[in-house]
Image: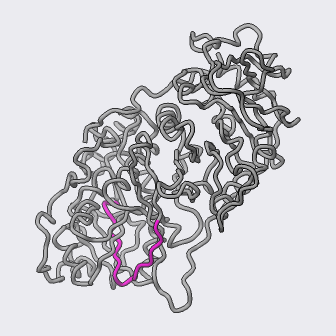
Amino acid sequence: MIGKQLGRWMILTPLLFGTVSHVASAQKTPEGDASLKFTLRSRVASPELAGACRVVETAESWNPRSTAIIVCDMWDLHHCLNAVRRETELAPRMDQVLKSARERGVTIIHAPSSCMDAYKGHPARDRALKTPKSANLPAEIGQWCKKIPAEEQENYPVDQTDGGEDDDLAEHARWAAKLTSMGRDPRAPWKSQTAALTIDSARDYISDDGNEIWSVLEERGIGNVILMGVHTNMCVLGRPFGLRQMAKNGKKVVLMRDMTDTMYNPLKAPFVSHFSGTDRVIDHVERYVCPTVTSDQLLGGKPFRYKGDTRPHAVFLVAEDEYKTETTLPPFAAKWLAKDYRISFVFDSATDKNTLTGASAIDDADVLIVSVRRRAFPTAQLDAVKRHVAAGKGVVGIRTASHAFALRGDSPPPEGHAVWPEFDAEVLGGHYTGHHAVGPKVTLSFGESPQARAIAKVDAYSIGGREMVVLSSSGSLYKVRPLASSTTTIFMGQIPGQEPEPVAWTNLTTTGGRVFYTSLGHVDDFKQFNFAVLLRNAIDWTAGRAIDPEVQPASTAAISFPK
């Protein structure tokens, strides 16, 4: 199979390793400026993006005195043991966030639902009870909100009809028995908020009542609300004090996306990992409900990430007008990568093709998939690509990536923008000089390198019962010879009457980064099973993952999930 062959060949490739971690700097507060500095992230759908969205990042300054954090349902116990484990891991970081925000003047509201009996007589509970009832209580603020108008016509991102428990069944049975032995209801064992979160008796509030919490916000003149806690797809979204109620009733509300979790079982659609399920819910929030922020924007360092979330981050950089990869790469990622990768798309702006949206994702990428054609991006954005390469991280180039950051001729870039015409030679190891005429079909064969020929013996042209000879291309054949000596050719392409040209190869950068490039990438190429497998295998290799010779696409890339 091609997955097995590419994996065997890649093992033979000499490797160098070098890593440089990029650490986000802490938000600095200028002397005399006590405002909170946030970058709000939201998503805007565009019909031409095949279901993907442009990420919109907006810098804002919030007055701490006009800001509240609501901590949703961080209970002492839960019926799902894995949920308890994740909350236990999350809570220390969350406590740091609360302490930092509190000291800067942010109001903290603890909202462990159905646990108010544990706080009878507690100063923070009494403070909420004594708050005067607001004169402008919104209708239904005391009720759950299952959807807001923006969500009406949209598919829900995960199937949570089983309650979302992701425990091993035998372990879950033992956990339920233990809860019963403790005198707890195994279906609803919570009695208080986790003790890992500090409640400041002198300043905080405790309430699980939408009317009370709204009254606290109004009495204190709070217009900005940050939600954190569990679980986003259920309580954080739907509670009377949750994201939907805050958003529809006019508060500037955000989800702190790294201070949350979901109730999602990977055995249910869309059959991705638990953490990929959480990502899908956060994407839904950013599209239809409210923006999100991260804890590092208060604390510095990096956003929180669960130890069990070992997925590499695949960032797609897409900005070209010729081959419509904005329509082919999102479905490819959904079908072939969503189970095993964190996925981000960085597109060009809808109004400025030389500016990227959501470019901050590049600095967190493990592998950068480049499908760009003749663009000159702002210097800071192109510098992020250069940092990625300098750190020895993986790069996958698709078709026009050979002239991604090079303008035609001697055209100067716009002011404040930059080009990198050496990207082809220095990173990809190519030598693009143009292409042959459009029209002739490009037939492919294994390259002439010893490694490629070695794995071409016996079953080289077989993958899942499909013959490798069906892999061809409708796109014009690129002229890319001679390749750098550091490259190894995988496929050669040929059209009648012309010398063959490499169409797929690997390279190693001077900093040890793994690179794969293919001049394939025409719309019709993505319709071929073998091309998708080749691209998936290449991404695995450049990201440092073991190549799965049996890799298959997800069977539910686009279905409607029950709410």
Can residue 170 be spotted in the picture? no
Q: Residue at x 14, y 79 (%)?
A: 134
Q: Residue at x 57, y 39 (%)?
A: 322
- Which percent across, then down, holds residue 254? 36, 65
- SS majority, magenta: strand
- Above-or-below relation of 312 to 120: above
- Front-most of residues 347 and 251: 347
- Front-most of residues 68 and 427: 427
Give the total of numbered labels. 0
Q: Quadrant of residue 480?
A: top right
State which quarter of the image contains the N terminus: top right
Q: Quadrant of residue 321?
A: top right
Q: Residue at x 77, y 10 (%)?
A: 457
- Front-most of residues 91 and 246: 246
Left or right for 444, reference 356: right
- Which percent across, then down, holds residue 239? 23, 59
Range of the magenta residues? 58-74
Q: Residue at x 73, y 23 (%)?
A: 491
State which quarter of the image contains the C terminus: top left
- Front-most of residues 398 and 103: 398
